[in-house]
Amino acid sequence: MNLLNQTKPILRRKQRDLYCQEYQSLVSLYLKIAGKTIYSGLYSCLDQVCLIWGLIIAAIFLTAQFAPISWTTQAIAWSILTLAGTLAMMILTHFWVKQQQLNWILYTWVILMVGGVTLTDCGIFLGWGFILTNLSHLWLGLCSLGYMVTGLGLNSRALLLVGVEHLLGIFILPHVIGWQFLATAAIMVVSLLVLAETQWDINLSQINKQN
């Protein structure tokens, strides 16, 4: 594995022919108004997961930032949403990771998400002050680890950079006191949208040879 010598761009616009070669299951979305195509998108199983998590994260952290809802109620909702997102991730990517012999990456994300929910719920229901005051740090850290592990597994500089971005986001939080949930949502959601709308620098043939 040599990430530095890859010739592929880190991120680029999706090239339909190459994308269809890399991913067998694709979903096309079109938005037409008055017969004119305003938007068209091509989404792999990984892109679909990014979009789902983007919606879930936006709902969770924007609610925490702006809605006057009790922490207990939010914890229950967060747990349901996160577990639902984890289940959707497993269903959507199961065939792909099995085909590429990358099940361990999926298991890593499942462990990180379930572990994050468990720690969050303990912080809220058991009154663990350190967790409560560092929820944004916790989730940025967990996602940073997940992206870095995935980046190494997929030989992707793009995912490694996203992992570093999330890690750096932790150091930004002390400067946005009072808006930490909003800042966390911005970092995580924008990253997921960029990943969903672009083609990453992964080389499936190289991964298969290594396996």
Image (spheres, grey):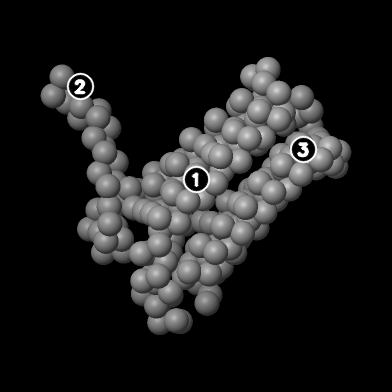
Q: Where is residue 92 in the image (x, y as percent from the top left)?
A: 38, 54
- The residue positioned 55% from the left and 32% from the top of the image is 58
- In the picture provided, is 33 more to the left or to the right than 76? left
Residue 67 position by quadrant: top right
Residue 127 position by quadrant: top right
As drawn, 125 above or below 199: above
- Whether residue 163 is visible to the viewer of this picture, yes or no, is no
Q: What is the count of numbered marks?
A: 3
First along the sequence among labels 1 and 3: 1
Q: What amino acid does circle 1 point to?
A: Gly
Residue 109 position by quadrant: bottom right
First along the sequence among labels 3 and 2: 2
- The residue positioned 45% from the left and 81% from the top of the image is 211
- In the picture provided, is 66 more to the left or to the right than 151? right
- The residue positioned 27% from the left and 32% from the top of the image is 39
Disc number lying in front (3 or 2)? 3
- In the picture provided, is 35 more to the left or to the right than 170? left
Query: Circle 1 sits on which residue?
Result: 85
- The residue positioned 47% from the left and 70% from the top of the image is 102
As drawn, 96 above or below 63: below
Q: Where is residue 121 in the image (x, y as percent from the top left)?
A: 72, 42
Query: Circle 3 sits on which residue?
Result: 125
First along the sequence among labels 2 and 1: 2
Disc number lying in front (1 or 3)? 3
Q: What amino acid does circle 2 point to?
A: Ile
- In the picture provided, is 136 more to the left or to the right than 95? right
Query: Of all residues shown, which one is farthest toward the right?
Result: 129
The label number, if any, that marks residue 33 in the structure image: 2
Q: How crowded is mark 3: few (under 14 residues within 10 Å), some or many (20 or more)?
A: few
Q: How far apart, in angstroms, are the residues tagged by discs 2 and 1?
A: 31 Å
SS for dot 3? helix
